Image (cartoon, grey):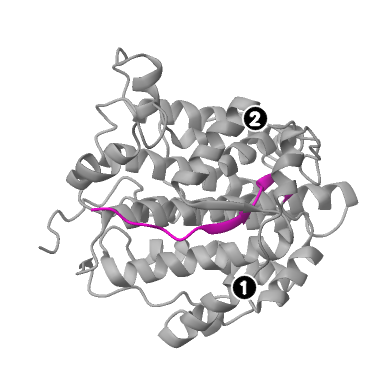
Amino acid sequence: MTYSLPPLNLPYPETLPSRRSELVTAVRAVGAGRGLLAAFGEPAARAGLRLRLSERPAPDPDVRSGLRAGRWEGLRSLPVSPPSPQAHAEQDEHDRYFAVQRTGDDVERDFVAGLLLAHLSAYENCLAMGVTLLDQPEWYRLFAGLRGLARFVEGEDAPSPGGSAQDEPPPQPSPSGWRDGYNPAARWLIGHQLFFALIQGAIVGLNCFASATADASGDREQGLALSAAFLRSSAAAMKLTSDFDPADYDATVRPAMSPPRVREGFSGLQTRDHACLIRLFGALKPTLTALAGRVGVHEELVDSVISAYAAHEYICARFRGDVLPSLRMAATTHGKTKRPGTEVIREMMRARLALIAPAAPSGPPATAPGEADPLGPEPRTGRPS
């Protein structure tokens, strides 16, 4: 079972916006204010939104050639070094596989439009295919970053108690279970597109934090909270991405991520946006680690990183990565390694936490406060015939 995915336009992550004013302009340009999520529940409204968001000029080829020529400006707020030429090549391959097209004409608009389109595609995929792994709180967190962005551009520090009708995510497909539109390949690709857009949101939040720190402005903690909200959404998105029968991963999804379609060792480590996020963590390390124990939102960021890596561990274990190496590990060791992928993910989590907190946890990912166990519940195994 295959699936041809329309390309999703996203900016190069190194060019993402870094100030609230830039986001305000972009949100207004695409009409992405409060109440937008409610429109997801109406087919006609979804069609109109997709048409409006898809109208944009062709991507500027000079953006990519400029990066190749070394005219690298780095992140707007910080001097972050560019990836290596090999990393660029692997990231290009990763973008092609997941149908992501990088743009540079109107970065602010493209970020917001891409974020909305990714959410819209994921929601329509849920309506067609069904949902079995996300409970109601996780469904709510899936849209937390988008809701946080709406509040951020309006200058709100936090949602009002209990939220409001215009803050509510679209209704979760009910009853739980897979539907006639069951297609593991589609779920895998669409879920990853959403993940990339959400990681861009986390970068934007950190960018705003960094610029507010430099300017000594009041957006500092709000930027950090926005980044944490997007990371929590990315955890829910990853769990959604794995919501299909594990047998279909072995039969359909994993073989598609092998030669000749992609190079041997194709890996999520090639994700351009995640690589940029980690470089940004490194650049902000002195500032972030100094906040530990002093600013409550710093703990939110740490918890959100833990939840994100726990979600990756969940997917890995769901598809036998608790006993098998990843594609990249198998390729780099020529099939000799016996280390399971989940073990590597936990090591990566500890390394990332060391960039933002002075004392990284030494044990496995913990359940963040108020969250369900990221490694449960047990999924259903039946599917439509």
**Residue occupying image coordinates x 74% and y 65%:** 23
Q: Position of residue 138 (x, y in %)?
A: 39, 61
**Residue occupying image coordinates x 71% and y 39%:** 288
Mark 2 and mark 1 lie on one chain; the one further toward the N terminus is 1
- Element class at badge 2: loop
Q: Position of residue 72 (x, y in %)?
A: 79, 37
Residue at which label 1 appears? 55
The Cα atoms of the two marked residues, 2 and 1, are separated by: 45 Å
Looking at the picture, tell me which residue is in the foreground, 88 or 13: 88
For the view shown, which residue lies furthest in the right direction? 215
Amino acid type of the residue that numbered disc 2 sits on in the rendered structure = Pro
Looking at the picture, tell me which residue is in the foreground, 355 or 180: 180
Q: Is residue 217 left or right of residue 63?
A: right
Q: Is residue 163 left or right of residue 249?
A: right
Q: Is residue 284 magenta?
A: no
Q: Nearer the viewer, mark 2 or mark 1?
A: 1
Looking at the picture, tell me which residue is in the foreground, 294 or 355: 355
Quadrant, the C terminus: bottom left
Residue interval drawn in magenta: 1-15
Above/below status of 357 relative to 20:
above
- Element class at badge 1: loop
Amino acid type of the residue that numbered disc 1 sits on in the rendered structure = Glu
Above/below status of 311 relative to 133:
above
Q: Is residue 6 magenta?
A: yes
Residue at which label 2 appears? 358
Can the viewer see residue 271 in this picture? no
Q: Residues within 10 Å of mark 1 (few under 14, many from 20)?
A: few
**Residue occupying image coordinates x 25% and y 61%:** 132
Q: Position of residue 346 (x, y in %)?
A: 43, 30
